[in-house]
Image (tube, rainbow, N blue to C red):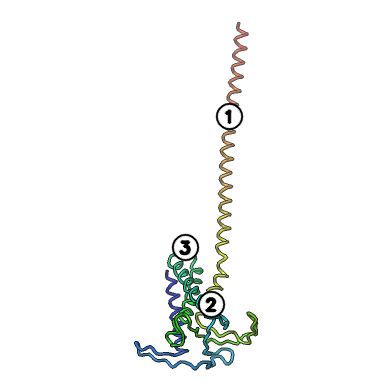
Amino acid sequence: MKVLFFSLFIVITDQLSKFFIKGGTIPLLNIHVSGMSYGESINIIGDFFKLTFVENPGIAFGIDVDGVSKLLLSLFTLLASIGVFYYLWKSKEQKLIIRLALAFILGGAIGNLIDRTFYGLFYGYAPLFYGKVVDFFNMDFFDFTIFGKTYDRFPIFNIADSSVTIGVALLLIFHRTPSGETKETEIEKSEDKLLDNNEINSEVNGKTNDSETTNSSLSEDNKNNVENYKREEIQN
């Protein structure tokens, strides 16, 4: 449950950063931020890291999609977010690191979902579910190719993207733990079986010893009876 507050923190941080990058007006709070011009860049660490304001109408890495696919993507993200939220609300036995990873993913998913769902209406350029995601982190890495497209810089991203990436990485690293727990459980079951077998063997051995003791007692009685019979014959 507490990790949901972490998801909320991610959403708030993500939305505030986007608001200050894109700019806008909130009349109820009498707040106006001019923001950056589209395509404008501000160097933070030379050319390696800078803030560049762009908007992504599609999905990750600037891949564009048609209107229907975009609507389906938004609805799927909404349903997935509800599912993760419900799981985190109810889950208590799962390890903290796994719940934290899901909280990262949930916060990031909701952050970008807000852009796609409401930004078109808020800024007056598109209907519900057809907004664009605000991106601004611009970093220079090695050239790479993905989905048939070559990039000389890493695709511009935002806090929500980073949150989802961190969450997925944590799941990949730490989700192996349950298999370890399964192995430990199997070992414990094997040990229990061995203990049960030892107890059964002990009972069988105990019964065998009792039987041998009984047979020995019967043999002694028979010997005594034979000797008594011989004595009676001699006396007669």
Badge 1: residue crowd in 10 Å (few <14, some 14–19, many ≥20): few
Element class at badge 2: helix
Three-letter amino acid code of the residue under disc 3: Glu
In terms of image quadrants, where is residue 156? Answer: bottom right
Give me the residue at 59% from left, 14% from top.
228
Element class at badge 3: loop
Image quadrant in which the N terminus is located:
bottom left
Does 92 sit left or right of 56 as displayed? left
Badge 3: residue crowd in 10 Å (few <14, some 14–19, many ≥20): few
Pick the residue in front: 174 or 125: 125
The reply to whether callout 2 and callout 1 are in contact (CB within 8 Å) is: no
- Residue 32 percent coordinates (x, y): 39, 91
Mark earlier in primary sequence (2, 1): 2
Q: Is 6 drawn above or below residue 41 in the view shown?
A: above
**Disc ID at residue 52:** none
Q: CA distance from mark 3 to mark 1?
A: 55 Å
**Disc ID at residue 69:** 2
Q: Is 154 drawn above or below residue 37 in the view shown?
A: above
Foreground mark, 3 or 1, reads 3
Q: Is 9 drawn above or below residue 213 in the view shown?
A: below
Q: CA distance from mark 2 to mark 1?
A: 85 Å
Mark earlier in primary sequence (2, 3): 2
Foreground mark, 2 or 3, reads 2
Q: CA distance from mark 2 to mark 3?
A: 37 Å
Report the label total. 3
In terms of image quadrants, where is residue 48? Answer: bottom right
Element class at badge 1: helix
Q: Which residue is mark 3?
A: 93
Badge 2: residue crowd in 10 Å (few <14, some 14–19, many ≥20): few
**Disc ID at residue 213:** 1
- Residue 87 percent coordinates (x, y): 46, 66
Three-letter amino acid code of the residue under disc 2: Ser
